[in-house]
Amino acid sequence: MKKLVPKIYRTTNWSSYNQALIKRGNISIWFDPKTQWYAQPQGKHGQNQTYSDTAIQCCLMIKSLFRLSLHMVTGFAQSLIKLCGLNWTASDYSTLCRRQKHIDIAISYQKSRDGLDLLVDSTGLKFLGEGEWKHKKHQPEYRRQWRILPIGIDAKTLQIRAVQLTTSNIDEQIDSVYTDGAYDTKQCRLVIADRKAYAVNPPRKMQSLGNIIKFIRESEMNYFEQLNVSAGHYGNNGQAIITEV
């Protein structure tokens, strides 16, 4: 069998590519004056919390984004509040350390008016246990634990619309799902087809397709011909957008 030669995609739109790299460093942080920064009295015995979950979550987001220590987060957040002209105070590092263990993070949902063009990619998360460096240096190697975090991104707005462990009780129309070759499997295609959407991804090498998958892929190619585009063209663009985010 003739060996498949992978295609090499070269960057031709250098002007747009350079502007995208510049936008990566463009960060604007705004505080809404209507934000409930301080916690409301609970009417219970004991000392009430000073800062709301929103304030704690805001400081922790700054910590994660800039990779700061809790001490530096307090000073950084206080300087941003001062620049915005708000009469607030930033939480101290000990409160952040205590509250971050039990905070409930609420992610707001924005329903799209049109169908979604979803870009899917995933990353691995490694769990570091206590004393791992010591175990690696002085004892035999052992298997580490990994978790996979799939992320779905709206191709138009670049908003993260789906992550692992999200609820599926809110249904909305999906026109197409953009993935790389790792998701060109029977199970992924059947799930996407069950949602009456088209899977846009390059085929995997040396893949044996069943009759059902062949039928789905033929339907997708007819869909692409109607739009006068190719799967490789869309897959390449989708992969570039994921890299840009």
Image (cartoon, grey):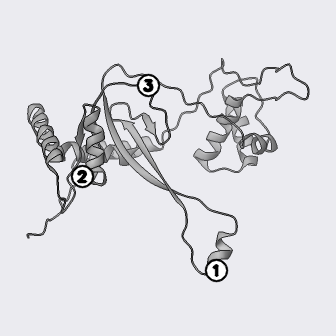
> Alpha-carbon neighbours of circle 3 within 10 Å: few (<14), some, or many (≥20)?
few
Of mark 1 and mark 3, the one earlier in the sequence is: 1
Residue 35 at what x, y percent from top left? Answer: 66, 21
- The residue that appears at 66% across and 26% down in the rendered structure is 84
| Mark 2 surroundings: few (<14), some (14-19) or many (≥20) residues within 10 A | few
User: What x and y, as percent, mark residue 59?
Assistant: 68, 38
Hey, what amino acid is under mark 3? Ile
Left or right: residue 223 versus residue 159 is left
Label 1 vs label 2, nearer the camera: 1
The residue positioned 55% from the left and 30% from the top of the image is 107
Work out how far the residue at label 1 is from the one at label 2, CA to CA, in angstroms: 43 Å
Q: Looking at numbered disc 1 in the image, what kind of residue is underneath it?
A: Lys
* Amino acid type indicated by mark 2: Thr
Q: CA distance from mark 3 to mark 2?
A: 38 Å
Question: Mark 3 highlights which residue?
Answer: 170
Q: Which residue is mark 1?
A: 137
Q: Is residue 163 above or below residue 186?
A: above
Q: Which residue is mark 2?
A: 11
- In this figure, what is the number of numbered marks? 3
Marks 3 and 2: CB-CB under 8 Å? no
Q: Which of the 4 quarters of the picture holds residue 20?
A: top left
Q: Which label lies toward us, 1 or 3?
A: 3
Residue 49: x and y in percent read 82, 29
Of the image marks 3 and 2, the number of the one nearer the N terminus: 2
Q: Is residue 190 left or right of residue 100?
A: left
Asked whether the beta carbons under mark 1 and mark 3 sit within 8 Å of each other, the answer is no
